[in-house]
Amino acid sequence: MKKKYLLNQTLCAVLLLSGVWANAREESRPHKNGKASFKTEAGDCVTPTAQFDLDINNVRARLLTGGDLWWNLSEAKYEVPKGDQNSVSLNAIFSGSIWISGYDAGGNLKCAAQRYRQGGDDYWPGPLMNGAVDKATCNKYDRFFNVLGTDIDKARTAYLQKGSATTLADIPKGLLGWPGKGNQYLASDPSLVGETFNIDDNLAPFKDVDGDGLYDPLKGDYPYIPCRNGQAEAYADQMVFWTINDVGNQHTESSGQAIGVQINCLGFAFQTTNDVNNMTFYKYEIINKSTNPLYNTYISQNVDPDLGCFDNDAIGCDTSRSLGIVYNRSDDADCNGVAGYHEQLPLLGIDFFEGPLSDSGQQLGMSSFIYYTNGGTFDNDPSSAAQYRNYQQGLWLDGVPITKGGNGRTGGTSDPTHFVYPGNPADPTGWSEETAHTTAGDRRFVQTSGPFTLVPGVAQDVTIGVVFVRPAGVHGVGYPPNFATAIGPADDLAQALFNTCFKLVDGPAAPTLSIRETSNELIINLVNEVGSNNYGESYDQVDGSVATAVNNELGGHGDSTFTFEGYKIYQVANPQVSATDLDDPGKALLVAQVDVKNGVSRVVNFV
């Protein structure tokens, strides 16, 4: 996936590019009429057990098939920065989960939620058929489907070079085992021996190259990240798919009535040299597989962020970025056997990039942000469907609205709000845990989008990203942290990536250097093979972060694309010379420059 360099002992080609400067509504519910039944029948599935790590970059994030994330059912497992498995682990999140609630046409509250499985389960693995699922299906899908970007690169290159002559030998097992609709090669995955997967429905997303609606990697199809505008062709360096439902059995976690919902989950990450290397992303396709609409629906990302030690955390939000944030109230020492980040303090944020669409087709985004605390009073952990629902609506456990100032309940004003602690902790005039003078504790927070109607058969998408920053030096981000300067730029980078449908911009692929030696001269032929992103010297890509900066600085005008302009060929002292050394005459000598013939005479690097 990433930019590749070819260095021929004494010569290297450098590619030239141009154009670088180039308020939630009040809730209403249907009235009970006492005539129709809207009950969703529960299945006989058992508690799911599968776990898997999303770990391609500087994060090791644990995934589970029970509606929860980032833990192993007893310990925090969102490790960043990722270390050796035998070393001390630094974890920034203890766990997280998806919450959904709404009302049926009879006015009955339905809820699917998860926290720590202390009461039981609300989610089970597997897709729904006719709104139902059985134990065998749950067991079969109690697993993860993993694919690497390098494997997709390999398969795509083979297809572009061979076309219809592509064979099974050209396709890595991750692509053969991807559960796209109609995949007939799942049995080729050794881990699926003895299993029969008939993927008759839309499960894992894929780029349908031949347009037949079925996933066939031999025909050029490949796993990808779906985009609401339908223009995505991007894939990450690692993508993990799993599917869950809320009708596998009785809801013993929330005690809520089952909805009949299926959630197709995609976790993915990129291996880069910038802040994206410390991020992970999650896309949920939420489908009502029952025959009944769910009215006034809310969907939430619940997070229990333990930023190292769990007892000195504080939280806040940046509503302009739809970002929930956790930070330390002091130097983060070890506590109760849990490793802390010590003096080099980090920040972690959950960006709610994309929520469902409203009934009028508008993007809802983050409609509320609220916290609750381990051992709290008005802000204690929820234990019933009604209490989960209250938090989703931006209300306290007992249904009382958040009020501005103080801790959101007392010590402030009587003005209601849906967002608690929206101020920057470094701003003494804003409303944050600093100006409220709260006591640090084991915080949890809930980011919600809604209300809307979850129509049967219509998919709704939710996309979030986890952003982590830990600057070098004593005290890292400092205390109290400045959200705008400490985590804002990294989150803007994440947002720009989302805006481009997660199409991470790779530089032009290095050409093959074909060199023929004659008397006192080298004849060099630069070849971009079929499958290269610069085949035909046609490289031209938009970088979302550059586009944002260009628009901000030039009022929406200007060229924000990277366009291929030519090559520079250097003679270098040895193979250890890097691109940063090319201006050092003791290490590199420019021997030739080959430009595209056009009107561009000045190339400016955007930093």
Image (cartoon, helix red, strand yellow):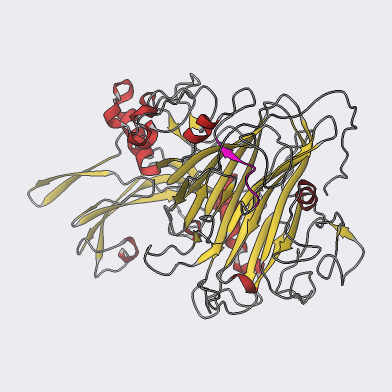
Above or below, 105 relative to 22: above
Q: Does the magenta portion include 152?
A: no
Magenta stretch, overall SS:
loop
Percent position of residue 507, x then y: 40, 48
Image-based side of 142 in relation to 325, left or right: left
Residue 106: name its quadrant.
top right
Q: Nearer the viewer, residue 600 or 441?
A: 441
Residue at image location 30% in from the left, 69% down from the top: 584
Q: Does the magenta portion include 121?
A: yes
Numbered circles on residues, count: 0
Above or below, 508 relative to 477: above
Q: Nearer the viewer, residue 238 or 12?
A: 238
Percent position of residue 269, x then y: 48, 50
Above or below, 470 relative to 248: below
Residue at image location 75% in from the left, 29% down from the top: 39
Extreme residue in the right direction: 414
Q: Which residues are magenta?
A: 119-125
Q: Nearer the viewer, residue 141 or 341?
A: 141
Image-based side of 390 in relation to 559, left or right: right
Mark yes or no: residue 517 visible. Answer: yes
Extreme residue in the left direction: 519
Above or below, 367 relative to 295: below
